[in-house]
Amino acid sequence: MKPRIAIDAMGGDEGVRVMLGGAAEARHRHERFTFLLVGDEKQIKAGLDNHPNLRAASEILHTEEVVKGEDKPSQALRKSKNSSMGLAIQAVKSGDCSAAVSAGNTGALMAMAKLALRTMPGIDRPALAALLPTLEDTDMVMLDLGANTECDARNLVQFAIMGAVYSQIIFGFERPRTGLLNIGTEESKGTEALRDAAAALRAATHLPMHFQGFTEADKISRGDVDVVVTDGFSGNIALKALEGTARFVTDLLKRSFQSSLRSKIGFLISRPATELLKHHLDPNNHNGAVFLGLNGVVVKSHGSASIKGVANAVEVAARLVEDNITQRIGDVLKDFDTSAIASNGVAASGSGSQGSDGFPK
């Protein structure tokens, strides 16, 4: 299947310029990609003058209505039939496109995608998954990052299955090492939902993962696990803490190197190492969060992503389409009935990231 991707050209901090630039860069890397560019036709046509390779592989779907960053999901849903975000998702639902990419409001994107595409059989709630850097050669998958503020054991097991399949596709791992985020590694630690989910995953040895039990937050970036599973409340906090720490370290290094002439000389000597650190921590190199569990592929780009970041998000969307992630998750669920998993009585809530894009600005 040649990926045809719907681009919400109006989303994100810079809108058309960055979204078209990212699509053009992805098209330059992969000539098989084609696009439906959704948004203001006049702006899009002007932007395509700078990207003839993208123009030759794209169609334009005109709309002037845009979901704003401050719109609540309920407000955005009222725009779903005519907004650039809503029309991009509708293109996936109709089968005109195989995936949608938007840098707009995460809460709105989640609400629209869930309403239009619905959750796939065997999945109670979709989860937001992203790639995060580690000390190892590959990134890791973490979910949920803000779509569901409260989760029961069944939700967590479903997230683990989806995250493992995602890791298989992106990194080629046969049985990704998977852990549940907890306050300790002992089996007695954590909430009832966590303990019940861990028991179910330990017993289900046929699942496409190597379940490693509980993992603590300070081990997330070490690369000891390939998939970290948690509820959206804890996941969003952990994500922002990680990104905040990364900015703290880079800002502290910058301040230290500017403190004296000797420090400036030291910076010049160590510049190759600091550039490597900067590259490793650059969120654009890990851009493209995915709503897993829907009947279709929807990818969320960071709102302030660069052209390179948007291109990476487009490539993630195409990879998931080509490797048929929805069917692969469904195949695993056919052999594993999560409805039998004990519930702790906590009902999973709706989007926990209303008005937020799930990432620090």
Image: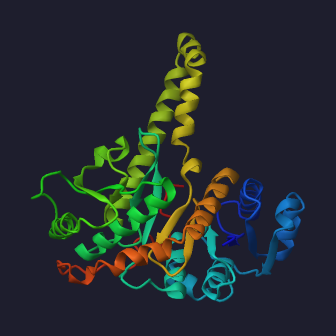
In the displayed structure, 138 sits above or below 6; it is: above
**Residue 189 drawn at (x, y percent):** 13, 57
> In screen coordinates, is 162 left or right of 197?
right
**Residue 299 drawn at (x, y percent):** 56, 68
Protein image colouring: rainbow
**Residue 70 drawn at (x, y percent):** 56, 71
The answer, for residue 185, to whether it is visible in the render is yes
Q: Which residue does the image show at 86% across and 73% down from the upper left?
A: 42
**Residue 47 drawn at (x, y percent):** 84, 63
Q: Which residue does the image show at 53% across and 21% down from the upper left?
A: 257
Q: Which residue does the image show at 18% across and 67% down from the upper left?
A: 203
In the displayed structure, 148 sits above or below 82; it is: above
> In screen coordinates, is 153 left or right of 334?
left
In this view, the residue in front, 143 or 9, is: 143
Circle count: 0
On-image quarter of the N terminus: bottom right
Q: Quadrant of residue 343?
A: bottom left
In the displayed structure, 56 sits above or below 135; it is: below
> In screen coordinates, is 27 left or right of 356?
right
In this view, the residue in front, 65 or 279, is: 279
- Which residue sits furthest top? 262
> In screen coordinates, is 78 left or right of 213?
right
In the displayed structure, 168 sits above or below 43; it is: above
On-image quarter of the C terminus: bottom right
In this view, the residue in front, 110 or 25, is: 25
The answer, for residue 71, to whether it is visible in the render is no
